[in-house]
Amino acid sequence: MFDANMSTNDSLIPSDQPNNSRIQRRQFVLATLSLGFAGSFFGEPQRAFADQGTQYRLNDSMPTFRKVRATLDVEGKVRVNPDGKKVREFPMSLSGQYEYDERLMPKPLLKRTIRYYSKAHTKTQASGQPGEAGIDPVKKLIVNDFTGGPQAVIFCPEFSLTREELELVTIPGNSLATSLLLPNDPVTIGQTWEVLDAGLVGVLNLDAISKNEVTGKLTKVEGQVATIELDGKVAGAVGGVATDVELRGKINFDLEANTITWFAAQISEERSIGHAHPGFTIKAVVRTQMEPIDEVAKLSDSAIAQLNLEPDMGQQMLLFDGREIGCRFMHPRDWHAMGETGKATVFRLIREGELLAQCNISRMTNLKAGEQTTLEGFQANVSSALGERLGQVMDAAERVTSEGLRELRITAVGTAEKLPITWVYYLMSDDTGRRYSLVFTYETTLTEKVAEADRTFTSGFSMLELEGPKAAQVKEEPEVKTATRRVKLEG
């Protein structure tokens, strides 16, 4: 997979390469998009060295406008344990092509870019099943924000991204983070330096680093091009899950333009299985080319003047567009879909690797048009479903939502497997008789952390038009497993 003789003139465009549920396959494949790779490579002949004693200051000034082209090739195995017991492995491969114009926002920011994508496309093979993903034509304008720290916040200022779309554009070798791989002080040819954690977090799309052994080295200067090599290992975490990365990379730095023009890396990564994403063992190659360009009309002052470019909570909300189950809603990024069928879908609330809550969404059998379940009848159904586990019903309420749906909400507490549990039941219905059940379950000791997460999750719930036969209510609910105990979540 890796070519030890790749040069800065290598083509950026690779040759074309050729169910589980949609969400499950996305977890197998798109988890690898957040791996961490950067963008010519190793083993080039040493030619026309500059004076060995000359010092070079490699501070990336980054042009206001530039064109970025990147390719990504990944091969490896994905590991899952859906039953919490036996770990299963699936082969996977991915090839991606990306191209966008990028504008660096002026001082005092210099930590935010706006991109306009002309291409973002992947082809995948997961357990023998092919797949493709591309960017929605109306979501080509993407903000890449580092103002909050070394981790990028990526969002579309005009439309909400889905989880799949977010992961599609969160590619390794972030163009703003690569500058942090450079040395802070002037260096001579052959001199090494310790690469900063902040640079590796941004380039490798990690949440945290516990051990960093990556060094950079200025290997040669030829004409106006300084060549830098990166080598070493990183131990870190993504979503609270441990990951080990071995990195070998190369950077070309244009001394005249004072900016990075090429970034490539080969990566080996071993990531553990998490509550929301599979584990994997992969090898990957990324190549990224960055070229200064003139002002781009779609990124001009007038084009972006009315856009909200701040990464606030509203901008970071994700869209779940459940075409199979027939519902749509917005949700914070710490809610993760675990699977979707025509009858049900499951979400988990995960923060910093801690599993806090689960939501089971079920499409129920329809009532006749105009019929509705009463709040008293819904409470009786909840009490019957919980049986001996029910301690008491804390509150029961009904309202009409902003989407025009009738919402019944009941909060109950009790015990399951000797643990204190809180259940929050929702029944959403419309005048045609369509109904959905949403059941939030969490340990009562986590109430303060979960807070009003269920209300935020359900606030924009809406129903979609469905085709085909109506599905019956799902009777069995899956289990949630924590590191120390197993809690059966039932509705």
Image: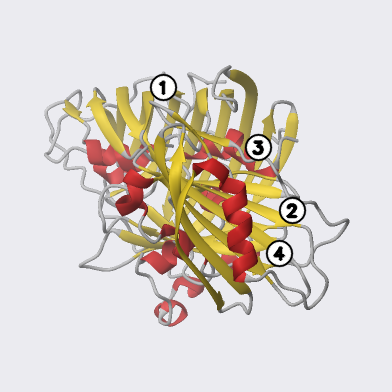
Task: Look at the numbered discs 2 and 1 and tell me whether their residues touch, using CB distance below 8 Å.
Answer: no
**Number of residue marks:** 4
Task: Look at the numbered discs 4 and 1 and tell me whether their residues touch, using CB distance below 8 Å.
Answer: no
For the residue carrying disc 3, how many other residues have a C-alpha within 10 Å: few (<14), some (14-19), or many (20+)?
A: many
Q: Amino acid at mark 2?
A: Glu
Residue that numbered label 1 is attached to: 42
Q: Quadrant of the N terminus?
A: top right
Q: CA distance from mark 3 to mark 4?
A: 28 Å
Task: Look at the numbered discs 2 and 3 and tell me whether their residues touch, using CB distance below 8 Å.
Answer: no
Q: Nearer the viewer, residue 80 or 6?
A: 80
Residue 278 in view here:
yes
For the residue carrying disc 4, how many other residues have a C-alpha within 10 Å: few (<14), some (14-19), or many (20+)?
A: many
Q: Earlier in the sequence, mark 3 or mark 4?
A: 3
- Indicate which label's residue lies in the foreground, 2 or 1: 2
Q: Amino acid at mark 1?
A: Phe
Name which residue lies at 80% across and 62% down: 466
Q: Amino acid at mark 3?
A: Arg
* Rendered location of residue 462, percent (x, y): 64, 69
Q: CA distance from mark 4 to mark 1?
A: 60 Å
Q: Residue lying at the far right in this picture: please name it.
A: 469
Q: Nearer the viewer, residue 258 or 52?
A: 258
Q: Quadrant of residue 89?
A: top right
Task: Look at the numbered discs 3 and 4 and tell me whether their residues touch, using CB distance below 8 Å.
Answer: no
Residue that numbered label 2 is attached to: 324
- Indicate which label's residue lies in the foreground, 4 or 1: 4
Q: Nearer the viewer, residue 486 or 208?
A: 486
Q: Amino acid at mark 4?
A: Arg
Secondary structure of residue under mark 4? strand
Residue that numbered label 4 is attached to: 435
- Indicate which label's residue lies in the foreground, 3 or 4: 4
- Indicate which label's residue lies in the foreground, 2 or 3: 2
Residue that numbered label 3 is attached to: 25
